Image (tube, rainbow, N blue to C red):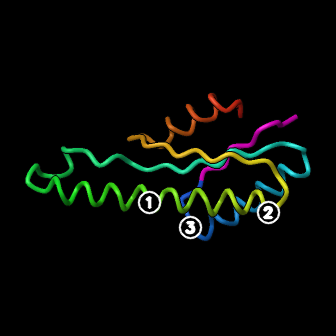
Amino acid sequence: MYKNILISTDGSELAGKAVKHGANLAKCLGAKVSVLKLRRPTTSSRWRRRWWKTRRRVHKRRAGRCCEVACVAGDTVKAAGVACDTVQVEHEHVYQAIIDTAKSKGCI
């Protein structure tokens, strides 16, 4: 029935529980998991031009945190014995990023 399950995470404790439950569901169904970590872009409209160095530092820090969260979730899924791939997306609208990723990964 299900061949690929998309799990979106933000690194919170509740999202961690969802990742574990999703991994167990995928294992029972013989499906694989795609873990999605979203982040909103840091745009120039949010930051003043004179703060470009700060914006760049914030962007790097957020990218590092995003990678860390995706890796932890991916490791949780792999520890359950389920095939997993991680996806990191930067998008202004969270709902649209989830829909686009689900379509591209065959989760719909």
Q: Nearer the viewer, residue 81 or 9?
A: 81
Q: Position of residue 14 (x, y in %)?
A: 63, 67
Going by the image, does 106 lie left or right of 24? left
Q: Nearer the viewer, residue 17 or 56?
A: 56
Q: Position of residue 46 (x, y in %)?
A: 21, 50
Q: Which class describes the residues within 10 Å of circle 3: few (<14), some (14-19), or many (20+)?
A: few
Q: Are marks 1 and 3 in contact (CB under 8 Å)?
A: no
Secondary structure beneath dot 3 equals loop
The magenta-colored residue range is 1-8
Q: Residue furthest left?
A: 50
Q: Look at 8% across and 54% down and name the residue there.
A: 50
Q: Amino acid at mark 1?
A: Gly
Secondary structure beneath dot 1 equals helix
Q: Which mark is residue 64?
A: 1
Q: Which mark is residue 79?
A: 2
Q: Is residue 25 above or below residue 12?
A: above
